[in-house]
Amino acid sequence: FGPASRADIALWAGTKPRDLDPALGRLRLRRFRDEAGGELLDLPRAPIPPADIPAPVRFLPTWDSVLLVHVRRAGVLPEEYRSRIFPTTMPQSIGTFLVDGAVAGTWRHDAGRVRWEAFAKIDRSSAREVEAEAERLAAFHA
């Protein structure tokens, strides 16, 4: 989950950031700064890939916690796609897939296949990754 801000950790834990401070103060944590200068915390030996390595394609289910945590943050869920994932006409979210760590489209399981639709054009390499992950997910559902 990390590196994460105190606010993100608290949101994930269902508590207030100030309530976490005593516990976070007792833990040995690595500390980083985000692009805006805010503090990020992580476990001491948690692996962190180099910044130039793209995140792998991932399929997220309905109501996935990654999207719930980032519902109003553009890092994972770009604001222009938010209403497509959390429509006011439905009681649940939509299954999504990530390309390089950000929501790039939606997916659904239909007739033994995983059908996906990108919100915008994605490059061929990413499309091949999405299709390969869709096939693995379909096999898991079988």
Image: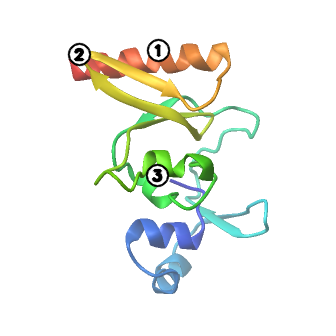
Q: Which quadrant of the rendered structure holds the C terminus?
A: top left
Q: Residue at x 45, y 70 (%)?
A: 11
Nearest to N terminus: mark 2 or mark 3? 3
**For the residue labelled by badge 3, is the local secondary structure a helix, a strand or a loop?**
helix
**For the residue labelled by badge 2, is the local secondary structure a helix, a strand or a loop?**
loop
Mark 1 surroundings within 10 Å by alpha-carbon count, few (fewer than 14), some (14 through 19), many (20 or more): few
Q: Residue at x 46, y 51 (%)?
A: 66
Q: Which numbered dot is residue 132?
A: 1
Q: Residue at x 35, y 40 (%)?
A: 61
Q: Which numbered dot is residue 111?
A: 2
Left or right of 11 on screen, residue 46: right
- Look at the numbered discs 2 and 3 and tell me whether their residues touch, using CB distance below 8 Å: no
Indicate how the structure is coloured in the image: rainbow
Measured from the top left, where is residue 136 in percent x and y? Answer: 37, 18
Measured from the top left, where is residue 90 in percent x and y? Answer: 31, 51
Q: Nearer the viewer, mark 1 or mark 2?
A: 2
Say which of 130 and 35 sits in front.
Answer: 130
- The amino acid beneath tag 1 is Ala
Residue at the disc numbered 3:
67
Mark 2 surroundings within 10 Å by alpha-carbon count, few (fewer than 14), some (14 through 19), many (20 or more): few
